[in-house]
Image (cartoon, rainbow, N blue to C red):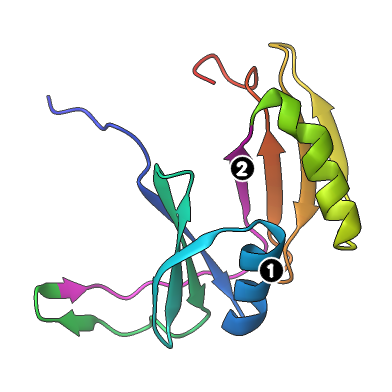
Amino acid sequence: MPKLDRVLETCLYVDDLDRAARFYEQVLELKALTSDARFRAYDVGGQSVLLLFRRGATLETVHMPGGTIPPHDGHGPLHMAFAIAADALPQWEERLHDHGIAVEGRTDWSRGGHSIYFRDPDGHLLELATPGLWAIY
């Protein structure tokens, strides 16, 4: 049986693409890979892609020269975690504080990892997690 290697991309649906882009570019310092009126794609650590789609903008099949992308969309606050180095956590907490972003939760994991939780402008719950969260991380 063929195996899966990793999650390549994940997406969040946002109400205001420009507002979301400012947050992800200014606060998290993600670099845009490509964009159009429907979405923005961001490089996450050179290993994965975060897609931000304007809510409701992908309800019809997208036709491109190389093929088609079926419709998709999402509603409600979602959750995703970013991996960070263990010694970077205090710097991230300071950065969030400097940008006026409240840390809503903290967890010390039994494997030794630590997580902090905060929200983006659309209410999605974001996590910064150090190694020691999962058996594989």
| Left or right relative to 91: residue 71 | left
Q: Nearer the viewer, residue 51 or 94?
A: 94
Residue 70 on image: x %, y %: 25, 73
Crowdedness near tag 1: few (<14), some (14–19) or many (≥20) residues, C-alpha within 10 Å: some
- Residue 1 falls inside the magenta stretch: no
Q: Quadrant of residue 134?
A: top right
| 55 or 18, nearer to the observer | 18
Query: Please, what is the three-letter code of the amino acid marked with disc 2?
Result: Ala
Q: Is residue 21 visible?
A: yes
Q: Which marked residue is nearer to the observer: mark 1 or mark 2?
A: 1
Q: What x and y, as percent, mark residue 79?
A: 63, 50
Give the answer, above or below, for where 100 lies relative to 2: below
Compared to 101, does 36 lie above or below?
A: below
Q: Disc 1 on helix, strand or loop?
A: helix
Magenta extent: 68-84
Q: Residue at x 61, y 42 (%)?
A: 81
Question: Based on the displayed image, in which of its 4 quarters is residue 100 positioned?
Answer: bottom right
Residue matched to label 1: 23
Residue 111: which quarter of the image?
Answer: top right
**Percent x, y for residue 114?**
76, 25
Q: Secondary structure at mark 2?
A: strand
Q: Position of residue 9 (x, y in %)?
A: 39, 52
Mark closer to the chain start, 1 or 2 = 1
Q: Residue at x 83, y 53 (%)?
A: 96
> What residue does disc 2 label?
81
At label 1, the amino acid type is Phe
Mark 2 crowdedness (10 Å alpha carbons): few <14, some 14-19, many ≥20: few
